[in-house]
Image (cartoon, rainbow, N blue to C red):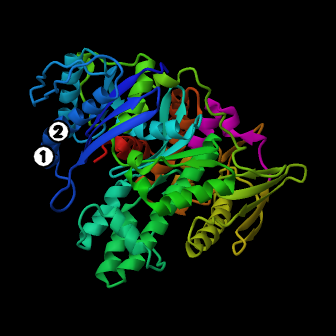
Amino acid sequence: MTETVRILGIEGTAWAASAAVFDAETDDVFIETNAYQPESGGIHPREAAEHMHDAIPRVVERALEHARETHDGPGTESPIDVDERGSSGQQAAPVDAIAFSRGPGLGPCLRVVGTAARALSQALEVPLIGVNHMVAHLEIGRHSSGFDSPVCLNASGANAHLLAYRNGHYRVLGETMDTGVGNAIDKFTRHVGWSHPGGPKVEEAAKGGEYIDLPYVVKGMDFSFSGIMSAAKQAADAGTPIEDICYSLQENVFGMLTEVSERALSLTGSDELVLGGGVGQNARLREMLAEMCAQRGAEFHAPEPRFLRDNAGMIAVLGAKMYDAGDTLALEDSRVDPDFRPDQVSVTWRADEPELAAGRGAGTAAENQVRGAEALVSLEPDAGRVTKHREAKTYRHPELDGRLRRERTTLEARLTSLARREGVPTPVLSDVDPREARLELEYVGTHDLREGLTTAGVRDVGRHLARLHESGFVHGDPTTRNVRVGPERTYLIDFGLGYHTDHVEDYAMDLHIFDQSLVGTADDPEPLREAVRDGYREVGEERVLERLRDVEGRGRYQSDA
């Protein structure tokens, strides 16, 4: 990056009216923020936009004052005035470009920010840069950590998802399938009469609580918060101590986020994890992620708190990377996009960087052992045997961890055998010990599907999943790492997240999980995605594929409100 680059960033997707100046030479980030605070309840889009209209000019002027005060070159002292029509005074501001949050977010708020950014770009005669808010959360973590190619967990108000870089884009590996993590917590706190924001209040109340049983829902690398929030509200209405509910909410919700983060590390082969988003300010979440990474020999980084909550600093830092790559916008192409998905962004600033060598070697393990997301697997190919042990996850509450390990070991044994009876190739089970969370199975195949992706192998997976669904259950975690390929057969393994169901939504989610793993690991996923649908169509029902299209269209990472 050109060392003299200074970028003015403007953020205003929902809550925070924020402006920042990033100096690439000194790595200094100055941030001025004026956050919207509703009088009651959650965010009100009209009120938030009115706040942006009033606050954006003030925070921008303060950031420009800082830029002028620290600028070595010539400049004037007259301020910039930006009104709702986009008119502005003249000012030779000491910045090289204007970066703004183009989306995702609330449309009325984004339009205020876009208008201000365009006005400044014209007045100062500097380029305009449109930044994806969610990618900025990832990039500020990558920038401050020095990591090469990490997996990123974004945990914010309306969002929770996992991103990893591949083929010039950030791919969504997993996400919430209903409400965002911050909004879920806020819904509970509003139910018990607490004011916004609810997250810090839950964190404080949890310090005096004890564990109670609440739902825990992980589907591959996707997850759901609606069930646990309904159960938490019911517990509060029934008189359960609020401290116990808050404690258990944190243990389960953050345990889910930590588990899927480990699954993403395992799938991609990465040994680096960064955290982004306002919920990342919670100390218990950071503690869980750090402990998980330490247990599997990975590195973890959480940016300082001012970069976790919505802020213009991350917009300015990513804007500098995009500016250096020549990734700027013409005014006529600068419309905001409330549904700006992170995987729509062309990652021009990383075009010359190596990609992850995804595979089964992630995590530290001895020779002839593989550390997956859940278990340590001992391989004895000469004896035709595999021993799988679900180790204790020290980041999880012991009661929750013990329950999950026992339940998943028992389910894996039952569903592996049931799938074989229904005509799906799986390993033969020779021994199971639920108390020790240990299984002994047949060694099958020569390699994971991930190590040799073919349309024929993927089509087999489509047929296999259809047979499971026709028999009334799902695999639960059908990724390219949980498929083994042999000379004549394609095997499904690791049924620990499977369950019996007759809901078409669950069948579609099973396909969606496999589809996401293809997108996250294949160089050219589109022919493979079509092949799995073709295979499914040969055996299964078209209505499942129709529901899959609905699932794909409801991505929760589209607006950070």
Q: Amino acid at mark 2?
A: Pro
**Which residue is at 34% across, 28% downward?**
70
Q: Is residue 298 above or below residue 198?
A: above
Q: Which residue is mark 1?
A: 46
Tell me the residue that label 2 is attached to: 108
Give the main secondary structure, helix, strand or loop, of the magenta stretch.
helix
Q: Which residues are magenta?
A: 443-464
Secondary element type, mark 1 = helix
Q: Nearer the viewer, residue 75 or 484?
A: 75
**Vertical side of 156 occupied by 61: above or below:** above
| Residue 215 screen position, x and y as percent | 45, 69
Task: Tell me what residue is drawn at x 36 percent, y 69 percent.
Answer: 202
Vertical position of residue 512 compared to residue 322: above or below? below
Q: Is residue 27 magenta?
A: no
At mark 2, the secondary structure is helix
Tags 1 and 2 in contact by the CB under 8 Å rule? yes
- The spot of residue 484 in percent (x, y) is 71, 44
Q: Taking 8 as reference, is 253 above or below it?
A: below
Q: Quadrant of residue 318?
A: top left
Question: Which residue type does callout 1 highlight?
Answer: Arg
Nearer the observer, 520 or 444: 520
| Residue extending furthest toward the right | 382
